[in-house]
Structures are given as structure tokens and as C-alpha cells.
Amino acid sequence: MLLMIDSLESCVMRTTKILNVCYYTLFVHWLSKGNCIRLFYNLFDTVAQFFEEKDAFLSYNLKEIRSDVAFWSELFAKFNEMNLQLQGSDKNLIKAKSVVTVFISKLLLFKRNIGRRELYQFPFLLKLDEQAGIGDDDLRVFCDHLATLHKNMMQRFEDLLLLEIPDWVINPFVIKEVGILEEELIGIQNDVELKPKFKINYQEFWLQMEVSDHYPALWMVVKKLHLAFPTSYLVERGFSAVIQLISKQRNRLQVCECGDLRLLLSDIKPDVGKLVSGHQAHPSH
């Protein structure tokens, strides 16, 4: 916070710099610094009071954009919630489409409610409106931002939103398919060995070896939805693992040629007892 204050004091357009620093931080460090604006807003009164003693003009400008900071802090918090839902090694295109579609639909809901001055989905704005009131012009600006964001996300995720997911992929035992897949779908619906395994979840069900061996046509459709990486999470996880492995003392470690990286990234837990039992103890002489 002291570094931010020092940098703000040295800027000519200091009020603009506050938002620029917040935007830059959020875009560069999405998750680690995603709550930067929220933290700044929680300290808003303290920061404004500090600037009032140092620079009354800056303090006045800062108070003028309080509603903007409140709006962006809560909007980026909602972004972070969506982003966290996309993290994990078990995510596939089906789950990614569901998360993104829900968020894009909520943007229109937020826009409609803010236009009606129904701010219960933005607690900071609601409290600010009750205490000091928020101008209609500011609310219209927020609505315009949400409309633009909705349009941009529709374009950015167009391929994901247009992705067709057959109903039988989610539940192959209750959906009837007409076409070349009907024969195999009837077979899988009457497979008494596979049916009990569907109770776990649909992803583990389709990833069984029996499915790809006995129902190749269905597997050709399903594998594109389950095996593709919908986000860069696994790549980022790999980079983080490499940073942990390669230190100043181990800068010559060939992570691609030994098993350290694979062991660190694997979700399989070693059976230590079995590994130990396979080695004969060497008593001291």
C-alpha cells in the first residue's frame, strides 16, 4: 500500500493512475491479484483521508470515482468466481461451456437490474446508493459497460457457445438417438455391466476402456468433448511445478528427462507400503 501511495503522489494525473494500476494488475495477475480493487475499496476511506491531508484535490477526485471503484471491484470478483470454476484437471469442454454460458447470461441480468436501480447483486453499490446516492448517469455508464462486456464475451467464446453437446453424452440411458449412433446407443443402454458404473459421473463413465473398445462410434463423438483442454490450467500448473523444481542449486536439472516433473504433476498417490515391501532391508554389520 505504501508503494502504491508513493507512486500515486508522483503522478500528474493521479486519479486516472489509480484505475490504470488496478486494471493492469488484474489483467497481468488474474487470480493472484484479482482482489486488488476490492482491497483498495475496503481501504477507500482510509486512503481518501490520507490524501486529504496531503493533496485535497486528489482526495476530491478520488471521492468522485468511488462508485466506479465499487462497481469494478465487484465485477472483477464475479470474474474471479467464474475463473476459479474453470480451474482443475478434471475440466472438459462440457463443463467449460456451462460455466461461461451462465456467466454471460448473468451479465444481461446485471445490466437489467442496475438499469432498474436494483443493486442487490452489487452490495458495495447498494450500500453506497443508500448512504449517498448514485447518479443516473453513473448507472447508465455501468449498464453500457456490461452490455459491451456481454458483446465482447459472445465474440470471444463464440466457438465454445456454438459447440453442440448431444443430450446422450450427459445421460446415455434415458435419451433416444436417431441416426447412425442409434445402434450403439441401444447397446450401451442395455449393457448391464456398464450401467451401474454410470452412477459415479458421466465423465468417468465415458473414459472407461470398455466404452472405447465396444462402442467406437459413440467414443469418436465423446472423446472430443472430454480429452480437449478447455483452459490453460494444466499448462500453468506445469510451469508452476517447474519453478518449484528448478532452483538456484538445481539449475541444471533436466525436468523433461527425469521423473520429477511427472511425479509432481501426477494425481496418483504412490503406495509407499508396497514400494517398501519390494526392497530387502540391509541390516548393519
Image (cartoon, grey):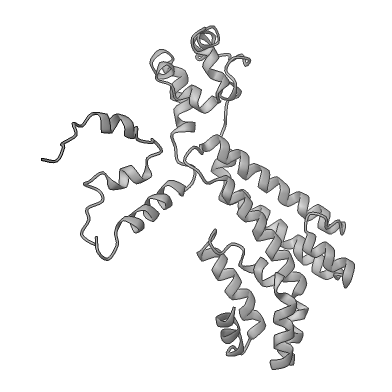
Percent position of residue 122, x then y: 77, 58
- Residue that appears at 26% across and 29% down: 277
**The C terminus appears in which quarter of the rendering?**
top left
| Drawn side of residue 169 relative to residue 278, left or right | right
* Residue 79: % across, % down: 63, 55
In this view of the protein, can residue 55 be seen by the observer?
no
Residue lying at 31% horizontally and 47% vertically, measured from the top left: 261
Residue in view at x 64 percent, y 42 percent:
101
Image quarter of residue 97: top right
Asked if 19 appears above or below 176 in the picture, the reply is below
Instruction: Check the image and report above or below for 30 versus 215.
Output: below
Q: Is residue 181 left or right of residue 239?
A: right
* Quarter of the picture holding the N terminus: bottom right
Residue 235 on image: x %, y %: 40, 49
Quarter occupied by residue 269: top left
**What is the quadrant of residue 253 in the picture?**
bottom left
Residue found at the far front of this picture: 285
Give the answer, above or below, for where 40 lies relative to 218: below
Question: What residue is rendered at 77% in x and 70% in y?
Answer: 67
Q: Residue 71 in the image: x percent, y percent?
A: 73, 65
